[in-house]
Image (cartoon, rainbow, N blue to C red):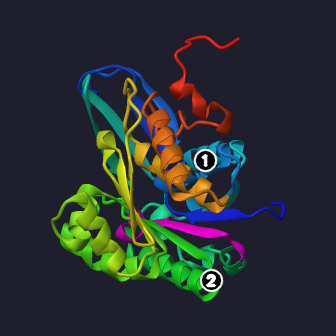
Amino acid sequence: MNDAPYVLTFGETMALMRTDQVGPLAHTSTLSLGIGGSESNVAIGLQRLGVQAVWCGRVGADSLGSLVEREIRAEGVDVRTVIDPWAPTGLMIKERRTPATQRVSYYRSGSAGSRITPENIDEQLVSGAALLHVTGITPALSPEAASTLRHAVEGARAHHVTVSFDLNYRGNLWSPESARSVYRDIIPLADIVFAGEDEAVIAVGAGDPEELARRISALGPRQAVIKLGADGAIALIQDTIFRQSAVTVDTVDTVGAGDAFVAGYLAEFVTGRGPQERLNTAAATGAFACLVPGDWEGLPRRHELPMLQTREPVSR
């Protein structure tokens, strides 16, 4: 890794199997194999936008673990993995039950990724980062993973490293009550907080998006960004409200769009761009992610960002 500023993130990335056709999984004869994980999605998004990213994770001593490591490294991300000989790499399966809906099933209980410990995150990587990005998925995996997230965040704060926290609620991992307790513990330690509207309600109670942003900011973060999907986003940044419209596209798959939004925002933040430009890029990267199946494959490179504004279908 060179001396350029880098964003550090860590978490569980799983192998991903998905159907290539609409219908019940039980009647599907073929599945595509790939990978997916919120934190590695963000790392890949940052890397494609020209910001060095480092991803730390724990995978099994199996072919799926090799796949995870190889795919993330192939995107230029600095990959720091621990190989766990006693636990498998996690797996998720996407089932496109109707043309407009899909179900995601997880097989990650006791997985290698859930066994991440503070010792798996190099303290020098934390202290030297421009920004540490974490999500609410990690503490939901296991007590060890929760302890690792808290340790890394406290280490970042001790070295004056900016902390970004995406609530990223997963209902099949924990209850809203359990999530709220952790959210209320981590939010005051973060500088930037991202949340979907429903996730923000879990953390701070019901309210309109602007009120949710203000309540989150009141807990300590200087920036609170509420992701509103097709309605865009609203952000409270140092006591000023900013609004962002969504970019309209023909949606194929929305999984990973929130991670893409975060990657776009953080890429502009780390490179010193202003609030509205951060949100503009975030909206564009989120839209790009919706254009293809898969969690991260559609993430744009910086030179591709203007493509969503052009009316010319062919560039020569």
The Cα atoms of the two marked residues, 1 and 2, are separated by 24 Å
Q: Secondary structure at mark 1?
A: helix
Q: Is residue 315 above or below residue 292?
A: above
User: The magenta stretch spans which residues?
Assistant: 128-140
Counting the numbered discs, the total is 2
Which residue is tagged 2?
Answer: 160
Q: Residue at x 58, y 50 (%)?
A: 65
| Residue found farthest to the left | 206
Q: Nearer the viewer, mark 1 or mark 2?
A: 2
Q: Residue at x 27, y 79 (%)?
A: 181
In what quadrant of the picture does the N terminus appear? Answer: bottom right
Which residue is tagged 1?
Answer: 44
Quadrant housing residue 111: bottom left
Q: Is residue 248 above or below residue 147?
A: above
Quadrant housing residue 241: bottom left
Q: Residue 95, image x and y in percent?
A: 30, 32
Q: Residues within 10 Å of mark 1 (few under 14, many from 20)?
A: many
Q: Secondary structure at mark 2?
A: loop
Residue 73 is left or right of residue 234, and the answer is right
- Amino acid beneath label 1: Ile
Q: Is residue 214 above or below residue 277?
A: below
Q: Earlier in the sequence, mark 1 or mark 2?
A: 1
Nearer to me, 284 or 52:
284
Does 249 lie within the magenta span? no
Q: Residue at x 45, y 72 (%)?
A: 238
Q: Residue 193, image x and y in percent?
A: 42, 67
